[in-house]
Image (spheres, coloured by chain):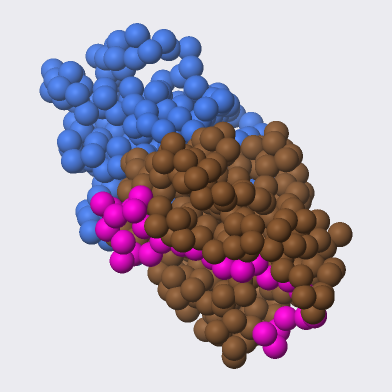
Chain colours: A brown, B blue
Amino acid sequence: MKRTIVIALAIFTFALTARAQESGKTIAERLGYPRDAKLLIVHADDLGMAHSVNVATMKAFESGLVNSGSIMVPCPWLSEIATYARANPQADLGLHLTLTSEWTNFRWGPVSSKDRVSSLLDKDGYFYLTETDAAAHADPKQVEIEIMAQIEKARSLGIQPTHLDSHMGTLYQSKELLEVFLRVARSQKLPVRVARSWFSRADILPESLKQDDVYIDRVLDINPGVTPQDWAKFYSEALKKLEPGVTEVVIHLAYDDAEMQGATFNHPNWGAAWRQRDLEFFTSDAFRKLIQENQIKLITWRELGKLLK
Amino acid sequence: MKRTIVIALAIFTFALTARAQESGKTIAERLGYPRDAKLLIVHADDLGMAHSVNVATMKAFESGLVNSGSIMVPCPWLSEIATYARANPQADLGLHLTLTSEWTNFRWGPVSSKDRVSSLLDKDGYFYLTETDAAAHADPKQVEIEIMAQIEKARSLGIQPTHLDSHMGTLYQSKELLEVFLRVARSQKLPVRVARSWFSRADILPESLKQDDVYIDRVLDINPGVTPQDWAKFYSEALKKLEPGVTEVVIHLAYDDAEMQGATFNHPNWGAAWRQRDLEFFTSDAFRKLIQENQIKLITWRELGKLLK
């Protein structure tokens, strides 16, 4: 996730439930917590993209402080994270549905047969580099074919996804794409990343939602305006001010190593050093202490998903 | 390249020319060298596979001692090596036609639409792990579709291949596959890796060749029986004993870094440390001295290709 996702994610996220919101209960209450509980999902994106991402995220999971993540099925290192998923069936792993291939030297394309999803492909046969190009060209029927293929492939490899979200927010770029995303998620009985705080995007969001859909309250993520020196400060201040309800902090983990430097060489935002900074902060004692001192309770998408069963 | 390629490559390689061999001239003579000249192509396989492979090979090219290589079009790091090819149009770069995906945690699939080449795919939609499985399942018509798609994609990215060879020797596994390979190479007027020394494989080789095809004399490559301690000794002895004619030494370059260790974790043969050993030997002063002291002349596939024009 990167680039205009800052804008897209400042607008969106979502979870489905069998209980209607009109009952007046908050998500926190539906999950069995007090109305004023501060609930946090610490979520690593982009699993399967690169070896560096996979090993950094698996290490972060060991810390217990990062407790959720989502997998990019079209990416070359999928098999490595699928092996992890099979060995750790309780891990909170969802699918990071992927319709973009954003690193210029390191590319991927669809799971489905290319001639069935030609609207998703650039002239070189890969997904488009940006979510705006992807959304501008995408035939929604082909989007549905491809994201269903990603879900089916994940399941065939033994991944039992706990949730769905959208790499670089491509599926939040138009009402048509969002409705494909929600329809697929409902068919799979899986919660998806949509947040109540995104309802300012009134053009596409509320009218696409159904009465028995339920939303998390907000997404927290860092953006390119934060300097490396202020990295820990940004997250620390956000956690100290965390409001009650369900927040997902969306992070990107990897090592600042040769592979990630090669992939992100021309794109420091969401680049190799960025990801190592996220790794260091979210596995640190400082983060553990912030959770304790601010009475933050870590929860997972698996808990949210139970509301749909 | 790996595993049974040792056997396959002990048997094969090939170059086409407009001049017939019955004229009695050796390849060396056709190229304008004396009959007793010792001509060597120092060829790195697997470009495009991984960032580590690309950067190690580009560094080796700078030394001038490694002077040829071939590119795997279906692999995720193709764009990085395509950028290099466009910036270095004189580089001797061919295509390492790819029908296998041999690293269990790091996979790739076809360039063509999956439903057109279903016989080339394993149950997860990738190429098969081994050349024997690939050859056992491959429909030759689909092989032709896929290797033509790889050539067309390379050209569309600005790569002007000087030669063709076959990753893991899949295209040398049967007469049918070899004939597809030779037919495609002839249509492209490109020389391919086939060696006179492989003619012991009488079942498929001589009868597939045409009168105006020309072969290099032999391929030299290291095999898993050589210990790391004997690496330099193996190559040094082979170079000291190099016979006259055209030899291609087929090597595999990469750094012994996290990415390559991750890809090859369960396969030390052709693994990360193996590739760094090759990199160190073939960019060493010792190798430079061996070339000089043994009157070895480095040539490229581009020179061989001129015989076809």
Quarter holding the C terminus of chain A is: bottom right
Residue drawn where x is 75% and y is 44% of the image: A158
Relative side of B288 to B264, left or right: left
Residue A61, position as x, y percentages in the image = 57, 39
Residue A180, position as x, y percentages in the image = 70, 77
Whether residue A220 appears in magenta in the rendering, the answer is yes
The residue nearer to you, when weighing B300 against A158, is A158
Q: Is residue B290 above or below residue A275?
A: above
Residue drawn where x is 22% and y is 55% of the image: B88
Q: Which residues are magenta?
A: A206-234
The answer to whether residue B183 is visible is: no
Q: Is residue A306 above or below residue A19?
A: above
Relative side of A298 to B185, left or right: right
Residue drawn where x is 64% and y is 37% of the image: A84
Q: Is residue B170 above or below residue A251?
A: above
Relative side of A225 to B227, left or right: left
